[in-house]
Amino acid sequence: MPVISVDWWKGNDRARRQELVSELTACVSRIAGCPEEAVTVIVRDVDPGHWGKGGVLADVLQADAAGATPAPQDTGGQP
């Protein structure tokens, strides 16, 4: 019983999640030689402000790519 966990940035719609689950299920079923019903896919939508890449939060990377300033984030009382 394969279990696949996918963490991706929040904002993908239901249709894209369905396509992801369907494609991953078919691929793993084929490679593992198990029925599709045995494959579980867990999709977690992660806010880009809770995702870091290269030491920088992803919302900052997105804003830089778009030429905008990210929304202020909760700093947990830290400056």
Image (cartoon, rainbow, N blue to C red):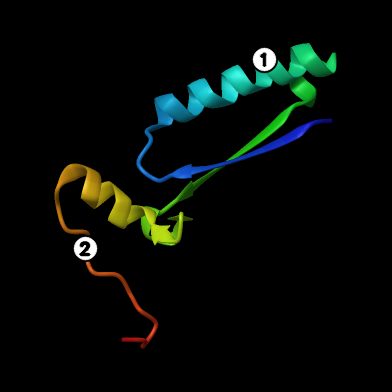
Instruction: Give the numbered dot on residue 71.
Output: 2
Question: Residue most toward the left?
Answer: 68
- Identify which amino acid the numbered label 1 is placed on: Ala
> Where does the image place residue 44, in percent across and percent down from the top left?
54, 46
| Residue 15 vs residue 52, the one in the foreground | 52
Quarter residue 28 falls in: top right
Q: Secondary structure at mark 2?
A: loop
Which of pointers 2 and 1 indicates the residue nearer the eye?
2
* Disc 2: CA contacts within 10 A as few (<14), some (14-19) or many (>=20): few
Residue 66 drawn above or below residue 36 = below
- Identify which amino acid the numbered label 2 is placed on: Ala
Residue position marked by numbered label 1 in the rendering: 26
Quarter residue 27 falls in: top right
Side of 29 relative to 25 (left or right): right
- At horizontal 59% and vertical 18% (from top left) the residue drawn is 23
Quarter residue 40 falls in: top right
Report how many numbered discs are placed on residues in the image.
2
